[in-house]
Image (tube, rainbow, N blue to C red):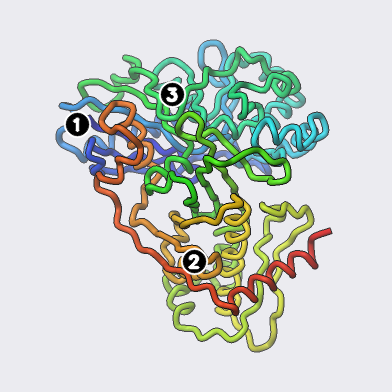
Amino acid sequence: MLVYAVDVGTTNVKVVLYDEQLRRLSIASAAAVYAHEGNRVEFDPKQLFDTVLDLIGQCAANCDYVARHEAVIAITGQAESLVLNDRRGKPVRPGMSWLDDRATAEAAELAEQFGIDHAFAATGQPYPSATWPAAKLRWLGRHEPGTLVSARSVLMIKDDLIRRFTGTAVGELTTRGFTYFWDVPNGAYWNEMLDFCSVSGGALPEVVAAGTDVGQVSEDVAARLPGASGYRVNAGALDHFCAMVGTDSYADGIVSESAGTVLSLSMLDHKWTFDPRRRVSFHSGLRPGDTVLFNGVDGGGAALEWFRRQGLAGMSYDELEQRLRSREYREPPIFLPYLTGVNPPDYFPDAKGAFLNLDLGHDQIDMAFAVEEGIAHLLRRNVEYLSPEPAHEIVSTGGGAASAFWSQLKADVCGVNVLVPDEHEATCRGAAVLALVAEGKLDRLEDANQLHAPAAVRYHHSRTEQREARYRLFEDSLRRLYRS
């Protein structure tokens, strides 16, 4: 059996081909294509599907024996992007990316109508946002009422790909908590929210568990795919949760950090119970009864990339790494990485980015250190906020994990060992694991660690009084500047 793991990312669309021993056979990727106009970000669902088919073909072309095997197409990736189709399955308008920010006023309406606390208890999301499909549907009802009238199915991006492959729309459970119209505790659509957004429950897909085999590829699509003895489709799971499986961090007490443009944190927590005072996003996990806590921090790698461009004249990350490692630091400035404003766990509405304690002796490398340290401070705040129980380990993936200096700094700041697997396709590996479990090739998710598990580097923490003093200064600066 072969597995084509499809990762529908925000920046790139990727397909990785695995055999049933989780050996990576080939990989192909393409840039995600969007139409940008102001705060509107849209995409063509058919073009996306054609891209996925092309990437599957590229992977197969690099492997001589695909035609002899059964194949599974396992789909992972982003959640919130929205696709609306008519009764023939044709899009009634371009897809709306989660990056699309037009529905900010509508998000505020959701808060006013339902109350932030009540909606949090139902949706698992601490605050409404223009990101969520619910806000976009409310916007469409106001500005494009004909669109909702003609729409017969309201799908998220993964749902639509499954529909195009199999002919039947299916929603996958771990992505539902990113809609703002799914009742996470009760495992059902939140009808009151749907009514407010002028959407019929009949337009929404049936929801299945993560890793569910959803059937064979339709004949017309199979004709466009490389030769195989048969094709089936697996519903996969949210990209962040698949990455946890792909790095063997889907376990209690292990924080999975995606150190990309957005700093994303996920953690399985079997002891979790709802507490309205702990504003942590909560979601159904990969197995019945599992709860995964999740936080997405905009002020992550985006802040370092901003300073690299604006403060370091585009210095390469490799050169920055060398300069940071060779420096003797006396007392660098403090950086508050709130360039995008609101960030968990504090959600300060008036927060801004800031350098503090600057003097004439500081240079651009001192400031770059402060940026990396400030993001590490923000990481610590979120790690400690995720669960009352101390984290056992942080497993870090993404572009930022490539920096040994930064990974060690994070370990020292958080007082938690940081593990960096040598696995650049953790999300696809995790999706392949889900498919192998569904097909009976593996008994449990954990068994994948016995199959070509990636090597890893562990950064052991060294929490010092100086490090603690720096963190207290960071906290005190936040409190004085932003906390009411």
Which comes before the other along the chain, label 1 or label 3? 1
Residue receiving disc 3: 162
What kind of residue is marked 1? Val
Percent across and percent down for residue 124 are 64, 36
Residue drawn at 43 percent across, 35 percent down: 76
Residue 43 image-quadrant placement: top right
274 vs 448, left or right, is right
Disc 1 from disc 3: Cα separation:
22 Å
Q: Quadrant of the N terminus?
A: top left
64 vs 259, left or right, is left
| Residues under numbered marks 1 and 3 in contact, where contact means CB atoms less than 8 Å apart | no
Residue receiving disc 2: 411
Percent across and percent down for residue 473 are 69, 73
What kind of residue is marked 3? Ile
Which of discs 2 and 3 lies nearer the camera? The answer is 2
As drawn, the residue found furthest toward the bottom would be 361
Q: Residues within 10 Å of mark 1 (few under 14, many from 20)?
A: many
Residue drawn at 48 percent across, 68 percent down: 406
Q: What secondary structure is found at the residue carrying circle 3?
A: helix
Residue 220 image-quadrant placement: top left
| Above or below 440: residue 262 | below
Q: What secondary structure is found at the residue carrying circle 1?
A: helix
